[in-house]
Image (cartoon, helix red, strand yellow):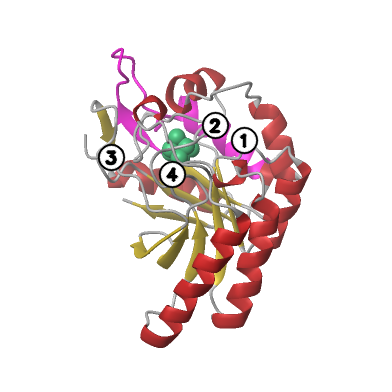
């Protein structure tokens, strides 16, 4: 299994398919994964295989490490296009997430005012007011919504606690357009041989109606890119992603596809 965990609290920069030159901010421990989902396609591996022993980095540690790295990038390059909260799990589960976002915005303004601050989130903590308000302050509030089918979510995203997709969709609407929906389409089967293909109309059309109701600034669709913990997953094809992207565009929604 060639899944990866990232250093903490800062990693990269890496060249992201979707974001450009991206400096990663990893609010999870550097020796494992912490996530409220346990997606079959997670490039960090399954939660039980990546139990961390180190603590979360503190707000002060993140701020210091980020400032040191930005000073180095200012002197030696490259200039980041984006500071991205991502890494070994779900960034918004960090207890000091809101304050750390404010620090990152402050440091961005000081060193690279043209860079964007992005958060890649699985959306499970947006019902928490401090997280919701912090996400309103970032440039790119990128929220995962792979489907609106509860059975598929349980089978593929494997939430680790109570998960109510309708409640989360209502909260996504409350961003009033200040969000980007990210959706992973794929094919193949899960560990039990059950199809996980969400590229057909049975999944795409209800999802599309929900996305229209959320009215995000953009939708990013993509497919698996690296090795996954479940080896029987398969990439969605270019044609399938292009078809879904075109459906979005035909409905007046800005969309991009990464293959
Ligand atoms: S939400 Fe992201 S980090 Fe969490 S399990 Fe899924 S892919 Fe991995």
Q: Earlier in the sequence, mark 1 or mark 4?
A: 4
Residue labelled with disc 4: 88
Q: Which residues are magenta?
A: 185-213
Q: Splitting the image into 4 quarters, where does residue 113 fall?
A: bottom right
Q: Residues within 10 Å of mark 2 (few under 14, many from 20)?
A: many
The span from disc 2 to disc 3 (Cα, nearest Å) is: 18 Å
Can you name the residue that lies furthest to the top here? 192
Mark carried by residue 124: 1
Q: Earlier in the sequence, mark 2 or mark 4?
A: 2
Verify CB contact (< 8 Å) between mark 2 and mark 3. no
Q: Position of residue 11 (x, y in %)?
A: 40, 60
Q: What residue do we see at 68% from left, 63% from top?
A: 102
Taking the image as shown, residue 232 lies to the left or right of residue 175, namely left
Disc 4 within 8 angstroms of ligand 1 (CB): yes
Q: Earlier in the sequence, mark 4 or mark 3?
A: 3
Residue labelled with disc 3: 3
Q: Quadrant of ligand 1?
A: top left
What element does badge 3 sit on?
loop
What element does badge 1 sit on?
loop
């Amino acid at each position: 299994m060639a899944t990866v965990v990232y250093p903490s609290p800062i990693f990269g920069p890496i060249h992201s398919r979707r974001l450009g030159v991206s400096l990663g901010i990893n609010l999870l421990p550097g020796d494992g994964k912490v996530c409220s989902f346990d997606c079959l396609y997670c490039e960090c591996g399954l939660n039980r295989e990546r139990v961390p022993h180190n603590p979360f980095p503190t707000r002060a540690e993140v701020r210091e490490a980020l400032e040191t790295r930005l000073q180095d990038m200012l002197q030696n390059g490259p200039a980041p296009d984006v500071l991205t909260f991502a890494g070994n799990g779900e960034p918004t589960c960090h207890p000091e997430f809101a304050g750390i976002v404010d620090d990152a915005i402050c440091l961005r303004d000081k060193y690279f005012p043209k860079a964007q601050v992005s958060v890649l989130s699985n959306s499970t903590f947006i019902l928490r007011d401090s997280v919701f308000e912090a996400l309103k302050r970032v440039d790119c509030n990128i929220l995962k919504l792979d489907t609106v089918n509860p059975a598929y979510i349980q089978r593929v995203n494997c939430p680790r606690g109570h998960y109510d997709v309708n409640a989360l969709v209502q909260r996504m609407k409350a961003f009033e357009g200040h969000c980007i929906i990210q959706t992973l389409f794929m094919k193949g089967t899960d560990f039990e041989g059950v199809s996980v293909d969400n590229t057909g109309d049975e999944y795409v059309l209800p999802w599309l109606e929900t996305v229209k109701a959320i009215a995000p600034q953009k939708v990013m669709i993509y497919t698996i890119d690296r090795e996954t913990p479940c080896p029987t997953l398969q990439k969605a094809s270019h044609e399938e992603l292009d078809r879904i992207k075109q459906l979005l565009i035909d409905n007046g929604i800005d969309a991009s596809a990464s293959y």
